[in-house]
Image: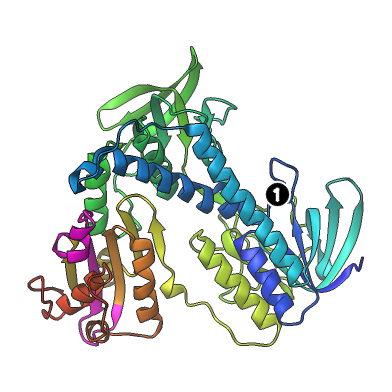
Amino acid sequence: MSTKFDVIVIGAGPAGYHAAIRAAQLGLNTACIEKWLDDSGEPAYGGTCLNVGCIPSKALLDTSHKFIEARDHFSEIGLTVTGLKVDVPAMIAKKSEVVRNLTRGIAGLLKANGVTTFEGSARVHASRSIEFTAHGGGTQTLNADHIIIATGSVPVEIPPCPITADYIIDSTGALALESVPKRLGVIGAGVIGLELGSVWARLGAEVVVLEALDEFLPMADATIAKEALKQLRKQGLDIRLGTRVTGSEIKKKKVVVAYSDSDGDKSETFDKLIVAVGRKPYTQDLLAADSGVNLDERGFIYVNDLCSTDAPGVYAVGDVVRGPMLAHKGMEEGIMVAERIAGQKTLVNYDCVPSVVYTHPEISWVGKTEQELKAAGESYKVGSFPMVASGRAMASNDTVGMIKVIADDATDRILGVHMLCAHSSELIAEAVIAMEFGSSAEDLGLTMFAHPTLSESLHEAALAVSGHAIHVAGRKRKK
């Protein structure tokens, strides 16, 4: 097997495998190194996203949502269900089947595109030399004209709550619970905490979410976040803001968590505790002292806007570099780097990266929030549309939420779109496309949308920016 390649990609997660496949498509002799193995000993292609993140969590979210719909809401539309019950092992088995099929699919895509794969760990040295150690033992040197680092991220651990095998678990453990905990604690009210908390709350757990920040989802638009908090609490999530966890211990097969809030020191007892306080870049044993690749103050690999590191010919993409830890952001960075290596002029528009929280209703956004624009002193105008006024939402018995469009007051160019509604993870793509092409709110308002659809709500919100909405009155102007 050759040890010299045009491109070597380290990591086969979303950023890595996209980079490797695109490089190979462009005629570059490409290799991809994957360190992690799944439970069966096969390479865990797809990284965190596919194996213990995006895909398995969505499988459980969709299944648990179907359960809660059947239990609590089918009767509202004339359907009666009897004998409904939760079979957690079957649910977990189906989730694992989905993951297994997709990891094998990526393996097939890499092979079909002529990417050489290596299973083991990599260490980057000077002059684009890689020390590769195979899982079965043995080390060899691989060389490349270009290296793309895509090693991803791992869950953050906190000293007050060290991860245990059975009681204090991270997001990976939360995706493999064998039964519904009677009482479940979640540390962190971010994307991961809210999604995992929602899964197990729907299936019957009493869920308490402890969040250190006083503000809920500060990265989202404040209006959307406020309504989302209201809806999640209504669904049974006991979300406590401004609570700082100070310690934990296992007592009589329970987790006792100590924390403090504005009222002083307190404690709660749980059957299980999920630590979901975020993720950090994974660079353990990756960079030799002579690699020339540097880290920033937060431990991310330092790159410029084109994902070049300080070492010539070495790039880094995805969770291991600055920016939101989102699979789709990493995918586009991987493709950009592969195409630039091949001589193309591809760029990633970081102003148009969509974000989604897959609760129900889903929370989605792209672009600037009102609070960001206020802080910057920018003049803007807002149009919004409540889902309760949507014919399709009413017909679907899913009318919670709203869509909000923010545009520049002078130019009408769309600056941000924010959604809280069913299927907003799909609807937000329309806003991303509009913003990618520099659309004004008027452009979106003049575009024909199919009726009846949920997407019409985006159309109405865009019309509302200038006070032209048909099914909702007025607009709000901010200067």
Q: Is residue 19 above or below residue 278?
A: below
- Name the residue at 33% across, 23% down: 266
Q: Tag 1's secondary structure?
A: loop
- Choose between 96 and 452: the one closer to the eye: 452
Residue behind mark 1: 284
Left/right placement of residue 228 relative to residue 332 reads left
Is 276 located above or below residue 302 in the figure?
Answer: above
Q: Position of residue 422 (x, y in %)?
A: 30, 57
Residue 230 position in % (x across, y down): 22, 46
Type of the residue with mark 1: Gln
Estimate the x, y position of residue 282 in percent, counting from the top left: 64, 52
Q: Is residue 269 above or below residue 60?
A: above
Residue 454 visible? The answer is yes
Question: What residue is at 57 percent from the left and 59 percent from the top?
Answer: 319
Quarter where residue 18 is shown: bottom right
The reply, left or right, for residue 1 in relation to residue 22 is right
Q: Is residue 64 magenta?
A: no
Q: Is residue 413 magenta?
A: yes
Between 7 and 103, the one lying in front of the other is 103
Q: Is residue 305 left or right of residue 194?
A: right
Please report the bounds of the magenta region as a residue range: 388-414
Q: Is residue 237 above or below residue 438?
A: above
Residue 296 spot, x, y in % from top left = 59, 60
Residue in the picture at 90% in, 67% down? 3
* Quadrant housing residue 344: bottom right
Quadrant where the N terminus lies? bottom right
